[in-house]
Image (cartoon, rainbow, N blue to C red):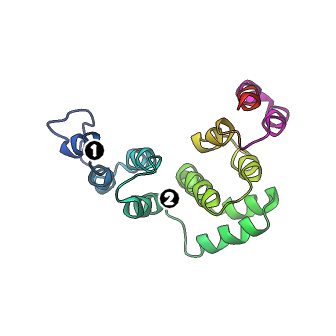
Amino acid sequence: MTDFVLLDFDRNPELSEWLSGGSALPLVQRLFDDGHHDEAATHARLALADHGCVDRDRIEAIVERIASPPDGWTEAVLRFAAEPDLDAWERLMSFTPPDMIYQRLRYTISLLQRLGTDPEIVFRCATHLGTTPDAIELVESGAVDPEVVAHRAVEAPLAAGIWLGLAAQASLA
C-alpha cells in the first residue's frame, strides 16, 4: 500500500480533476489500486450520489470489487428481494467474512434500493446489527415510517438515542 495524501493537490491530481468537474474515476481507481479500499469506496459513493456521475458504471464496478461478493451473490440478493424477511437476511449475510461486513452490507443495500425493495424492509434488515449511512439516508429521505425507526430503540436499547433521534427526524420528513 503506497502513501496517499488526499488533500495535497500537488501530489493528487486525480482529486483536483474531480473537484474541477471531471470524473471521480481516476481518484477512485488510484485509491483502489493503492490498496485504500475503504477510502476508494467512500469517494465512489460520494461520486455516485451525484445523478450526473460521469463513469457511473465503472465506479459501481469498483465498489462491487471492494465488497467482494461471492459468485451467486446477486442472484441471492434477487431471491431475498422477492421474499424479504429478517431470517432470509441473516442467511444471506451469514457467510460474509467479518472484515467484509461493512462494505458488503453497503453494497447490498445499494443493490436492494436499485431493485426497488421496500425501504422499510431494507432499513429493518440493514440495521439489525448496527447502522450505516445508507440506512440513515433512508430515514432522512422519508422512506421509513417513524414508528419503524422508533421500534429499533426497543430492539437495541443501547443505541436508543440514535434511533429515537432518527425517528423524530423521520416524523418531520
118 vs 151, left or right, is: left
* Residue type (three-letter) at the residue carrying disc 2: Ala
Q: Which residue is mark 1?
A: 21
Crowding at mark 2 (Cα within 10 Å: few <14, some 14-19, many 20+): many
Q: Position of residue 112 (x, y in %)?
A: 64, 59
Q: Is residue 158 above or below residue 55?
A: above
Q: Look at the image and tell me whether residue 97 can be seen.
A: no
The kind of residue on which mark 1 rests is Gly
Q: Is residue 49 above or below residue 7?
A: below
**Mark 1: few/some/many CA within 10 Å (<14, 14-19, 20+):** few
Query: Which element type, helix, strand or loop, lies under badge 1?
Result: loop
Q: Residue at x 16, y 39 (%)?
A: 11
Q: Give the side of residue 40 with respect to residue 130, left or right.
A: left
Residue 136, by quadrant, is top right
1 vs 2, front mark: 1
Q: Between 145 and 81, which is closer to the camera in this rendering? A: 145
C-alpha span from label 1 to label 2: 27 Å
Is residue 156 one of those drawn in magenta? Answer: yes
| Percent coordinates x, y for residue 51 in the rendering | 46, 50
Residue 22 % position (x, y): 26, 48
Count up the numbered dots.
Answer: 2
Which residue is outermost to the front? 52
Range of the magenta residues?
143-165
According to the image, label 2 marks what residue? Answer: 67
For numbered disc 2, what is the local secondary structure? helix
Quadrant placement of the C terminus: top right
**168 and 104: which is toward the camera:** 168
Q: Report the side of 145 relative to 130 (left or right).
A: right
